[in-house]
Image (tube, grey):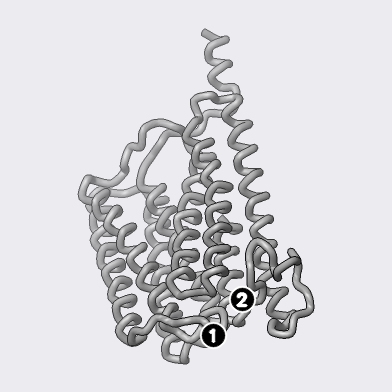
Amino acid sequence: MVAQAGIGVTGSVVRVTGSGLGCRTWPECQPGSMVPVQHAEYHQFTQWIEFSNRMLTGLVIAVAAIAVITAWRVKLDRPDRRRLLALAWTMPGGVVLQAVVGGMTVLAKLEWWTVAIHFLVSTPLIWLAVLLLHAFLEGDEPARWLVPPLGHKLLVTLVVALWAILIAGTTVTGAGPHGGDPETHRLDAPIETLATIHGAFLVCYLLVLVMFGLTLLRAGAPKRLWWRYSLVWVVALAQGVLGSVQYALGVPEALVSFHVLGSALVIIATAALWCGSRDRGAAAPAGAEERELTAA
């Protein structure tokens, strides 16, 4: 979770420092060189910022590989844990996909819509990382929802509203001043209108969250679910306040990266609420099935 969210934050640093084309080709940094070199048009500092972000992809792949190996070891003891291994494989697969999309973004000279896709591809990977963590800690029984059917529908609506916020946010970024390179094209649309739409989706998200809370109250939800519900409120409101301050101050660079971090935290909190709203049973310890058969 930290790796998937962190690579998005470092990517925002590349964008706000104008280093997106510090390495002007892909997979090489400069034509004929995999690493930054002296270049008349590209400052070496911006080259190293972009190059360092690319190298962090290797770290994310390493973490993803460890997750797969760990899930595979669990499955050796518990052959029925196919869901856990499948979720683990989405991590390295997603990182490779993200690297390819990142390369296409560079080759497209950071066109705003390619940057938007590059960011949006990372968001489901953060969500899946939360599901993977829960998969390690829970069983593999069919999901039994702890909320009534209306609550389940509201939860699905909440997730849809979350991605609407993220998509709308990329259009605000596309029209904003930080394109990753001074020469890149920007979205030709009034940023005030785009920011208003982005904020309206957040209001919808919060309204759905209120209605979901009422269903929890009526259903007598467990305490741990209320804790997760409260966490979503704290993170979402903090992100909303940060976005408003960021807009009022003229989108300073540092707040852009904090806003990207906030987006990741909202995804993590919402995914944790999703996972906490259903029960898949307890995770049996390794070898438990074999011990039961032996005892029988």
Q: Quadrant of the N terminus?
A: bottom right
Specify few, some or many for label 1: CA neighbours under 10 Å numbering under 14, 14-19, or 20 or more. few
Asked if 123 appears above or below 67 in the picture, the reply is: below
Amino acid identity at mark 1:
Glu
**Does the rendering let one see residue 135?**
yes
Pointers 2 and 1 in contact (C-beta within 8 Å): yes
The residue depicted at 59 percent of the width and 31 percent of the height is 74
The residue depicted at 33 percent of the width and 87 percent of the height is 190
Q: Is residue 208 left or right of residue 163?
A: left
Q: Secondary structure at mark 2?
A: loop
The mark that comes first in sequence, 2 or 1, is 2
- Mark drawn on residue 162: none
Q: Is residue 90 left or right of residue 210?
A: right
Give the residue at the far front of this rendering: 32
The residue depicted at 50 percent of the width and 30 percent of the height is 81
Q: Secondary structure at mark 1?
A: loop
Residue 272 image offset from top left, x and y in percent: 44, 53
Asked if 116 appears above or below 286 in the picture, the reply is: below
Query: For mark 1, what is the residue?
Result: 183
**Does the rendering let one see residue 217?**
no
The residue depicted at 55 percent of the width and 62 percent of the height is 5
Query: For mark 2, what is the residue?
Result: 21
Amino acid identity at mark 2:
Leu
Residue 262 image offset from top left, x and y in percent: 48, 70
Asked if 176 appears above or below 159 in the picture, the reply is: below
**Which quadrant of the structure image shows residue 51?**
bottom right
Give the residue at the far right of this rendering: 38
Residue 291 image offset from top left, x and y in percent: 58, 16
Give the residue at the far top of this rendering: 296
Residue closer to the observer: 217 or 195: 195
Residue closer to the observer: 46 or 270: 46
**Which quadrant of the structure image shows residue 36?**
bottom right
